[in-house]
Amino acid sequence: MAKKAQKRKVKTSKMPASVCWFEVPADDLDRAKKFYGSLFGWKFAKLSAAIADYWHIDTGGKDASPDGGIFPRMHPKQTITVYVSVPSVDKAMAKVKKLGGTICSGKTTVSGMGYFAICADQEENVFALWEPNQRAA
């Protein structure tokens, strides 16, 4: 008797402004994957060839706990970035500026998934805004 195909449960969060993704830059991807895999039990899967050296991190959470990505560090001061889900990246970027923050990288499309922007607070702590939208192109 054949087993039913198991559907992967998509992690979603209904609460606006909740952490929905994180990214870990690494100087040595193999070392970093071994470290986080051994420490937390995280699993890693290479994403499509369209995204060079970007690996999905499955944190194993059964609820809306965020997964993440790991990739080669692009500059020496680059640190872990937390993505926060917002209803509108455009409105959130305007609020960041109004509150004295900085837009480091403006609204960027992730086709079929949504939009993000990289920002910093007044103390130069970097974070990202994420607007889910499957029609993003």
Image (cartoon, rainbow, N blue to C red):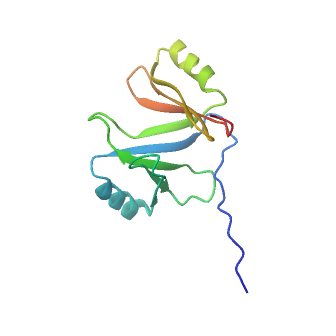
Q: Residue furthest bottom?
A: 1
Give 48 or 94, whichever is nearer the viewer.
48
Q: Position of residue 19 (x, y in %)?
A: 56, 40
Q: Residue at x 48, y 43 (%)?
A: 22
Where is 80 relative to 128, above or below? below
Quarter of the N terminus within the rendering? bottom right
Q: Position of residue 106 (x, y in %)?
A: 50, 23
Q: Residue at x 63, y 41 (%)?
A: 112
- Horizontal side of 125 relative to 2 (left or right) equals left
Q: Residue at x 44, y 43 (%)?
A: 23
Quarter of the C terminus within the rendering? top right
Query: How many numbered badges does the structure rendering display?
Result: 0
> Within the image, what quadrant is residue 14 found in?
top right
- Horizontal side of 71 relative to 89 (left or right) equals left
Give 12 or 72, whichever is nearer the viewer.
72
> Within the image, what quadrant is residue 136 found in?
top right
Where is 41 relative to 20, above or below? below
Where is 60 relative to 83, above or below? below
Q: Position of residue 16 (x, y in %)?
A: 66, 35
- Horizontal side of 52 relative to 15 (left or right) equals left
Q: Position of residue 56 (x, y in %)?
A: 48, 53
- Horizontal side of 87 relative to 103 (left or right) equals right
Q: Residue at x 54, y 61 (%)?
A: 60
